[in-house]
Amino acid sequence: MAPGIDADVAVVGAGPAGTAAALFAARRGYRVIVVDKQAFPRDKPCGEGLMPGGRPVLRELELEDAIVSGGAPPLHGIQFGLAGQPPVAVPFPEHGGERAGLGIRRLAFDARLVDALGHESRIQFCPQTEARDIRPADGGSARVITAAGEIRARVVAVADGLRSPFRHRLGWTVGPRPPHRYGVVAHWTMDAPVDPWVRITFDRGLEVYEGPVAGNQRMVALLCYQDRMGEFAGRLEARYREIAQTLRPALRNADLVGPVSAVGPFWYRASTLAQGGVFLLGDAAGFTDPITGEGVAAGLRQGRAFAAALESPNPERLYRQAHRRLTTDPRRVAALFLRLSRTPALVERAMRSHQRSPQTLTTLLGIGFGYWGFNRISPREWIRMFSGH
């Protein structure tokens, strides 16, 4: 990359949110430069579930067929349960003809996304290029200072992840807020038919979150509160294996493949999402918890909203409004699931309620996907969910 390059849009971070922002912006006619310090393909701890609300975005980017043909299995819904008890199956709601999600192996998914960057003539992709500083616009262009030179751009999209160094450097970071939660993530191979369900098993202070991905693998994450993370000190893989196989006995016939990774804490917010020509996208814009598996789909939708906002006379205000619409109710759903996760008695009540009113939890998932608002659930259904009667 030559020093002093000009572009309409500079994107820092080539994950799902940053790549979607770049592709949508380029297809609107903007000149885009994308920088990422990593080489691709690269792996990253992730829930690896693309919820149904993310599939229309993939379709608009003309990537859905390639992802599916690459072996991404369908996801039909979520099975919730307490350790040692039968789970309840909550199918995903149908909305706009969409019902199934996809199990995406993050390594392959990111590779497919950056391949699309290389095929777009208006995008210059610069992997292994570290962004060292971002300077908001002050009557002129915003700037990204990289190891290879300076990029001047009308706007800069920052999509550098959960712990976003640039969000922090700009003074926009809020959090992390207690109680702190962490993820311990790895993959297992199973000689068995594909199980098209995301499975969440609740235990004291943690949940096992499990879902299928390509290659007959299952991503298995332990989502833990801080008071249980001490168990992993000095023995991350061994303790992860013990807990996973105890709470999910089917994993005793599976093989652990690849590394075991830890990530967190999760709860971060941003004091502002757009200012001085700098926009925050994806996890950099704020992250609640991966318990609902909405992270990848949310990032794709935010990338699309960012590109659409660029054509507004006030793109920062329009993006902030769009981001609020995209995230407010899903965050409330995540908070509700976290409340359940800390109280096994509430999990049991919700499971009993599901037997009497099976549509309620499905509707709640739809709210989390942004399909509709909380008024879709009646007061009587709320009482039944929390009382079990």
Image: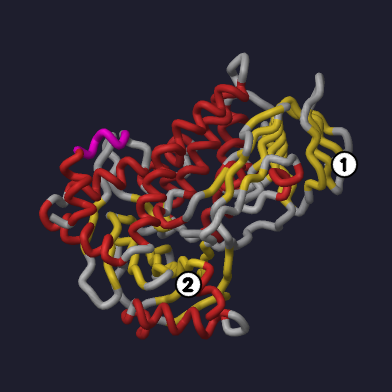
204 or 317, which lies in front? 204
42 or 81, which lies in front? 81
Please report whichever mark, 1 or 2, sits nearer to the chain's N-terminal start: 1
| Viewer can see residue 123 | yes
The crowd level at tag 1 (other Cα within 10 Å; few <14, some 14-19, many 20+) is some
Q: Name the quarter where the N terminus is drawn.
A: top right
Residue at 48% of width from left, 60% of height from top?
Answer: 105
The residue identified by callout 2 is: 187
Please give left or right for residue 76 compared with residue 204 in the image. Answer: left
Q: Secondary structure at mark 2?
A: strand
Real-space CA distance between mark 1 and mark 2, rounded to the nearest whole angstrom: 38 Å
**Residue 168 versus residue 302 in the image, above or below:** below
376 or 226, which lies in front? 226
The crowd level at tag 2 (other Cα within 10 Å; few <14, some 14-19, many 20+) is many
Q: Is 374 a magenta residue? A: yes
Residue at 58% of width from left, 60% of height from top?
Answer: 265
Residue 149 is tagged as: 1
| Viewer can see residue 19 | no
Numbered range of the magenta stretch:
373-378
Residue at 71% of width from left, 56% of height from top?
Answer: 38
How far from the left and from the top, in percent, is residue 202? 34, 68
Q: Amino acid at mark 2?
A: His
Residue 359 is tagged as: none
Residue at 10% of width from left, 54% of height from top?
Answer: 356
How far from the left and from the top, in percent, is residue 233? 60, 80
Q: Is 68 a magenta residue? A: no
Q: Quadrant of residue 262?
A: bottom right
Q: Amino acid at mark 1?
A: Gly
How far from the left and from the top, in percent, is residue 244? 41, 78
Q: Secondary structure at mark 1?
A: strand
How far from the left and from the top, in percent, is residue 83? 30, 75
